[in-house]
Amino acid sequence: MIETATLILFIGATFLLIAIPGPVVSLIMAETLKHGARYGFAVVGGTTVVGLFFLGLYIVGAAPLIVALGDYLDVIKIAGIVYLFYMGITNIIRRKQAIDTLVIKARKPYDAFKSAIFITASSPKTILFFAAFFPQFIDFEREVTPQLLMLSGVFILLAFALDSTWVLIARSARSLLSGPNMQERLNLISGIILCFAAVFLMFIQT
């Protein structure tokens, strides 16, 4: 369904983008640092559920829409690159902004699970991200839906694995990650990586 080279590019780009520290990663770290790994994995579960839901919506509605767009596809791809640049610059400029309003102090793992669902689902950027990112790796001369299904499966598996890795990192490095400037460092790093990702997508355009 998908050429090997394209799939490798997708895995690399997905790894790069999912690994970027952001609100979800910050929540994973905050819950793990304050309450332990069970709470971090509960956050991972919540974000995975929301990711599956949004991907389902995208798969059901995107294939006919993308095919219908035809000549406007390049515009969508360029818009996706610009959007990644925007997110990167915003993270760099606002790197000192705290996330205290995002983090809900959970007393039970289920509370952390609900917090993750709320934070992930309340952002309309999630669907826009999928709409901007996935078309970069689809061959529109072939049937679109099977490609979307395959890419979605790879995306969810990588997201779950990488988010779980953040839990393990936070658990083993509490003293390092609990400093007062943690969020500023994470925002700066995430902004730089987002801008790099935009450049990466620009150069793989065909």
Image: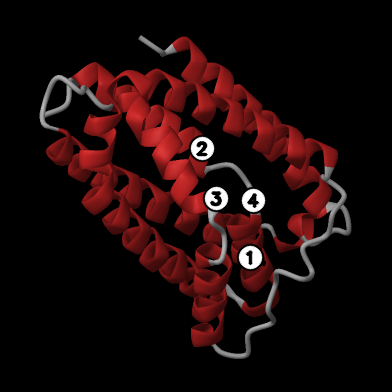
Query: Which residue in the protein does label 3 denote?
Result: 125
Report which residue position mark 4 lands on.
Answer: 22
- Does the rendering let one see residue 151? yes
Q: Residue at (57%, 76%) from the top-left corner?
A: 115
Amino acid type of the residue tagged 4 in the rendering: Gly
Determine the CA span between mark 3 and mark 4: 13 Å
| Measured Cα–Cα span from mark 1 to mark 4 | 9 Å
Between marks 3 and 1 in the image, the one whose residue lies nearer the viewer: 3
Task: Please indicate, yes or no, whether residue 14 appears anywhere in the rendered image.
Answer: no
Which residue corresponds to the image point at 35% horizontal and 9% vertical from the top-left? 206
Residues tagged 2 and 1 counted as in contact (Cβ below 8 A)? no
**Upstream in sequence: badge 2 or badge 3:** 2
Residue at 14%, 19% in the rendered image: 141
Tell me whether the residue at label 3 lies in contact with that at label 1, contact meaning CB atoms closer than 8 angstroms: no
* Mark 2: amino acid: Leu
**Color style of the picture:** secondary structure
Q: Residues within 10 Å of mark 2 (few under 14, many from 20)?
A: some
Instruction: Please indicate whether residue 202 sits to the left or right of residue 8 in the image.
Output: right
Q: Nearer the viewer, residue 23 or 36?
A: 23
Name which of mark 3 and mark 1 comes first in the sequence.
Answer: 1
Q: Amino acid at mark 3?
A: Lys
Q: Residues within 10 Å of mark 4 (few under 14, many from 20)?
A: some
**Disc on res. 27:** 1
CA separation in Å, label 4 and label 2: 10 Å
Check disc 1 and give the amino acid type. Answer: Leu
